[in-house]
Amino acid sequence: MLIIDCPFCGPRDEREFEYCGPYRKSRSDNMDDLSASDFIEYLIVPENPEGVGREFWWHKRGCGEWLLVVRDTKTHQILSTAEADAE
Amino acid sequence: MQKYSLYSLVRNSFTRHRNWSPAWINHDLKKSYDVIIIGGGGHGLATAYYLAKGYGVTNIAVLERGWLGGGNVARNTVTIRSNYLRQESIPFFIKSVEMYEGLSNELNFNLMHSRRSMIDIIQTYPKLREITRKMYTMDIFGSTYKPISVSEIRRRIPTLTGGGKDSRLPIIAGMVHPEGAVNRHDAVAWGYARAASSLGVEIHQNTKVNSLLKNDDGTIRGVSTVKGEIWADRVAVAVSGHTTQLTDTVGLRLPLRSFNLSAFVSEPVKPMIDVVVNCPDLGVYLSQTAKGELVIGGAPDPGQSFRRGTNQLVFERTVGAMLELFPSFKKLKLLRQWGGTVDIAPDASPIISETEIPGLYITAGWWGGYKAIPAGGLTFANLIATNTPHQLTKSFTLDRFKTLDYILEPGTTTRV
Ligand SMILES: Cc1cc2nc3c(=O)[nH]c(=O)nc-3n(C[C@H](O)[C@H](O)[C@H](O)COP(=O)(O)OP(=O)(O)OC[C@H]3O[C@@H](n4cnc5c(N)ncnc54)[C@H](O)[C@@H]3O)c2cc1C
Ligand SMILES: [Zn+2]
């Protein structure tokens, strides 16, 4: 079980959170400039690192904020937790 | 290949079973092969076997990082079934279930195959709607899925005493899938390995592939392993869960994410459940082995993972769900638990495909891919040998992602 250190609420156990997928940039206004294949890659090709990766977690049963968690997929150790900023 | 039979068993007992010949032969690595298959799991070994048997390709090396049967082929909960939703999936899984039924004979290896029906326990109306859709589509293709009453469920599974009218989620319906089966997973790995080896396929354990190699013209050249470079014009990736780790090395980006699925096994008890019970609303399924143990599976660890352990939270949720329906199992001791890494595409359907690198083939996205080993191996062999997809898997190529033509398949444990 993970203990996620929410920047707003402090350390809470995994039960309070919902995993929301690997990190990706938010959809920008210039999406129309992307080629079809780049857009599809943006949509469906995720980060899948065997090791350290970035991912979103939603503090669903807490403050409700979205967090960007840096976590090792082999050890499950969490390296950092921050507010997921809206780019 | 030394044939296994009652006769050979009796004959070898006179020499106290000391003279059995090895099930497969170890070779020295050659510099090149016609086909390299990466991954000595169920899919890799079956592919090698069908290539050698059906297409006369025998100059094959199967390169396995660990040992045979160390991957998911022997880490899964052996549920074999064809109750899928999509018309692209159902015929493929029907074929695979049928192939399993004759496989002990074909491989001359006792897989302890046991057809025993799977019963889906339904506790919510959205799930009822989904399985009703499944039923109509399956009916078209000849896979059986029959509604049964709650009292019939309780008659067939006497230990299922929870889920009554007063419970949080009362049981509202059930479905029987008579084709549902279980068998012995080690035997599937060993049986295919032995049969492939006898046809000339080389199996190399402890041979991790570090990266794929390309020629200057962009075609596949071979692989770089812990034991040096090996070349082949055709390289097939069958590494369940670790696909992107290899394809990334040649810049091939695939829509796959890796997750941890886990299983739990109880102490052996007397026979009490003779079907596979699947409870998709609570997220738990179980069956009883020939030895008497309950084999229990649940939902995946939520985050992406390459770990082979189990998440305590998944364990608690799975066992909690099981106890809601089977309160008497409280007294059972759980003896073992483990996990495995499987990868999944956005639509939860498999990928059996050529790639943009000529000569490089992949079989991946096998979430519930144990049941798919025979037909997966057969169709992947067909693709590698003929460079055209097999009729049964022509929808499962990477092409579907170019047009975002998803084959969305709600599985038992997926969230899609
Ligand atoms: C807990 C659990 C329960 C499951 N339950 C079911 C079920 O009930 N029914 C069902 O149909 N499916 C189930 N599955 C899924 C099923 O086990 C897999 O889809 C299937 O086994 C994958 O194919 P495989 O047998 O070829 O995989 P594997 O046996 O994992 O084979 C892949 C092999 O590749 C090797 N490898 C990886 N990287 C490299 C490398 N770089 N170089 C060389 N070798 C490498 C690995 O060591 C491994 O041996 C379950 C899985 C798990 C983990
Ligand atoms: Zn919070």
Image (spheres, rainbow, N blue to C red):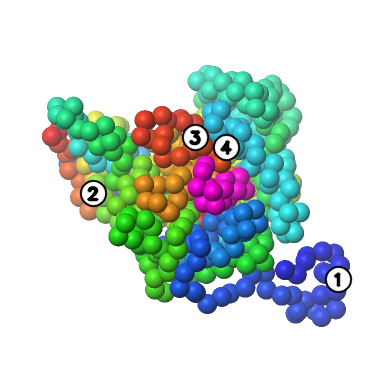
* Dot 1: chain letter: B
Identify residue type, mark 4: Gln
Which element carries disc 1, helix, strand or loop?
helix
CA distance for labels 2 and 3: 36 Å
The answer to if B386 sits in the magenta stretch is yes
Question: Could you tell me residue B151's position as x and y percent?
Answer: 71, 23
The answer to whether dots 1 and 3 both sit on one chain is yes
Which residue is at a point 37% across and 30% down the rendered structure image? B404
Which element carries disc 3, helix, strand or loop?
helix
Task: From the image, tell me which residue sits under label 1.
Answer: B10
CA distance for labels 4 and 1: 44 Å
Please tell me in which quadrant of the rendered image residue B245 appears: bottom left
* B254 is higher (above) or lower (below) than B124: below
Query: B171 or B333, which lies in front?
Result: B171
Task: From the image, tell me which residue sits under label 4.
Answer: B391
* B185 is higher (above) or lower (below) than B222: above
CA distance for labels 1 and 3: 49 Å
Which element carries disc 4, helix, strand or loop?
helix
Identify residue type, mark 2: Val
Q: Which residues are magenta?
A: B374-389
Other-residue count near label 4 (Cα within 10 Å), few / some / many at <14 / 14–19 / ≥20: few
Task: From the image, tell me which residue sits under label 2.
Answer: A70
CA distance for labels 4 and 3: 9 Å
Which residue is at a point 36% across and 42% down the rendered structure image? B255
Which element carries disc 2, helix, strand or loop?
strand
* Dot 2: chain letter: A
Task: From the image, tell me which residue sits under label 3.
Answer: B395
Identify residue type, mark 1: Val
Identify residue type, mark 3: Ser
* Dot 3: chain letter: B
Q: Which mark is residue B232?
A: none
